[in-house]
Amino acid sequence: MIDVDHVELYVGNAKQAAYYYAAAFGFNITAYKGLETGCRTHASYLLEQGNIRLVLTTALTPDHPACKHVSLYGDGVKDIAFCVKDALAAYEATTSRGGNGAMEPSEAEDRYGTIRQSAIHTYGEVWHSFVDRSEYKGKFFPGFEPIDPPVNRINREGDCGLRFLDHAVGNVEEGKMNEWVRWYEEVMGFSMFKHFDDADISTEYSALMSKVMSSGRGIIKFPINEPAPGKKKSQIQEYLDWHNGMPGVQHLAFRTDDGINSVGELRRRGVEFLHLPDTYYEIIWDRVGEIKEDRAKVKELGILVDRDDKGYLLQIFTKPIEDRPTLFFEIITRRGSESFGKGNFKALFESLELEQERRGNL
């Protein structure tokens, strides 16, 4: 696997969702597939920012899988696709090691060349596609046509600075985390990068456990969470409850080189983030020490800071991006740190619990 190729989300209304992602998060809508291009089953929009590619797909017919998916789970991630040198070899290797095939190797072509693709199932209803672009020179996939709608002008006036997908976090049922850790090790050839237990991620009321899986080159990282026993319901269990009991992708973390600029621009566009108590900043600096960014600005924007033995990071989490308390985004800047903000887990968990309480789900 070379890198993440794209992330596809199934949504109820791709046209409206694309506008929201463009206006709020700074993605450019660059290609489209639908009735006007000859596709009569679904409509898809390609959104790009830096090296991030998101595809928003909505069903046009009741028998398209996006129709049932949205009905059961709401908007959410369907496919985290990988760019590979050989889609057939990737499919054969993973299925021979126990992977369950979702799409047999196939080809699609147009005047720009040929794309080869295959896919396997991972947790819940999520797929991992394998995409070979080595013989394709088009914009994205056959069937997509380039577009440049007026909403893209907003992004020419102010850059959100999101560069690439840092990690994608999955939520699974209690007792299933180690099963999926083994799956990523045996089927995908990943290794465990970090491990956090309920002593690391807990409050008085709730807890979770997490293991971070990483590809061989360390480019692709997938934390896997499961709920841990607590006095009240954890954010992971809340996700599972509102995701119809089905595991799925909890959040996507987007890397930026300038967290101050990115978060400031996102807030200006109306993106809502989790609120931190001011007391967080009364104790954080003794632990974190000096940073490149202005401390006052970090506090003003509500950004969390953490340090490990290799450096520090800045991170902030949006509120859920839809009405169900499921999918959200993280904005992260790494200044050498390879961790995931372990020192922030308690403050983050308490902020999430406040939101859960407001929703009546704690």
Image (cartoon, rainbow, N blue to C red):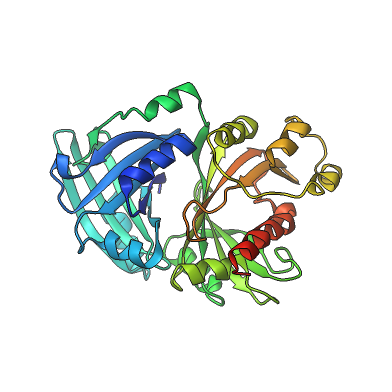
Residue drawn at x 72%, y 66% is 202
Residue drawn at x 50%, y 27% is 159
Residue 54: which quarter of the image?
A: top left
Q: Nearer the viewer, residue 244 or 175?
A: 244
In the visual, does 2 lie left or right of 340?
left
In the visual, does 285 lie left or right of 14?
right
Q: Nearer the viewer, residue 83 or 210?
A: 210
Can residue 182 be seen? Answer: no
Image position of 26 with respect to 125: above or below: above
Image position of 219 with respect to 241: above or below: above
Residue 35: which quarter of the image?
A: top left
- Disc tally is 0
Residue 296: which quarter of the image?
A: top right
Residue drawn at x 81%, y 35% is 290
Residue drawn at x 68%, y 51% is 341
In the visual, does 200 lie left or right of 81?
right
* Place of residue 318 in the rendered image (x, y in percent of width and height, measured from the top left): 57, 48
Image position of 186 with respect to 165: above or below: below
Q: Nearer the viewer, residue 240 or 292?
A: 240
If the image is split into quadrants, where does the C terminus sit? bottom right
* Place of residue 52 in the rendered image (x, y in percent of width and height, measured from the top left): 43, 39
* Place of residue 148 in the rendered image (x, y in percent of width and height, measured from the top left): 30, 28
Can residue 148 be seen? Answer: yes
Image position of 156 with respect to 229: above or below: above
* Place of residue 285 in the rendered image (x, y in percent of width and height, measured from the top left): 83, 42
In the visual, does 40 lie left or right of 48?
left
